[in-house]
Amino acid sequence: MGWLFLALIGGAIFFAISIYNRLVASRNQFKNAFAQIDVQLTRRHDLIPNLVETAKGYMAHEKDTLEAVINARSAAVSGLKNAARDPSDPEAMKALAQAEQGLSGALGRLFALSESYPDLKANENMMQLSEELTTTENKVAFARQAYNDSVMGYNTLRESFPNNFFAGWFNFAPAELLEIEDEAKREVPKVEF
């Protein structure tokens, strides 16, 4: 009878360790996925000063737009640093999403305004930077999707029974999705005949 009791205790301990290790692995997976976002957003942020410098020579009268892009970039860099410290912090993720939305909006205004400057639009450096930024935006979207998938898996694992008991006991907090809304893509197109 004593052996049976010890076997049950050993089985319970093994079960608890297994759940704990799966929670740790899942948490590490979503943190690694955020690191990939960090790489792509850092690349995006690094391209912007060159873009602004290139546009500055052509768009001397558009100082407010250029300053808005620079300020939005600074906010996005700060938001990324805060979120990178702890990707499980919901407030940091929300702040990052807001900062990135602000940056996307400012860049959208810059590109829309650049259409009014044919010399800038035809500038080889501007075309190259625009292409690199577009490629980076696509990589950010893929990295964000991978991160959100990892967060979904982690949150599902920590909320499932009996994992939810262990997640609570060992302080496995829920992770926050990174949802960056692009206002231009969300608008319904207007059709007029």
Image (cartoon, rainbow, N blue to C red):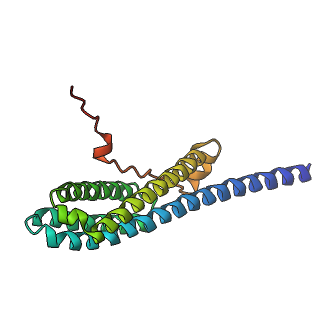
Farthest left residue in view? 61
Could you tell me if residue 86 is visible in this image? no
Res. 184 image quadrant: top left
Looking at this view, is 169 or 37 the one in front? 37
> Which residue is at a point 44% across and 51% down the rendered structure image?
176
Q: Position of residue 116 (x, y in %)?
A: 15, 57
Q: Is residue 100 above or below residue 8?
A: below
Q: Position of residue 36 (x, y in %)?
A: 49, 64
Which quarter of the figure is the C terminus placed in?
A: top left
> Which residue is at a point 36% across and 63% down the rendered structure image?
131
Looking at this view, is 80 or 141 the one in front? 141
> Which residue is at a point 32% across and 40% down the rendered structure image?
186
Numbered circles on residues, count = 0
Q: Is residue 183 left or right of residue 177?
A: left
Q: Position of residue 167 (x, y in %)?
A: 58, 52
Q: Position of residue 21 (x, y in %)?
A: 67, 59
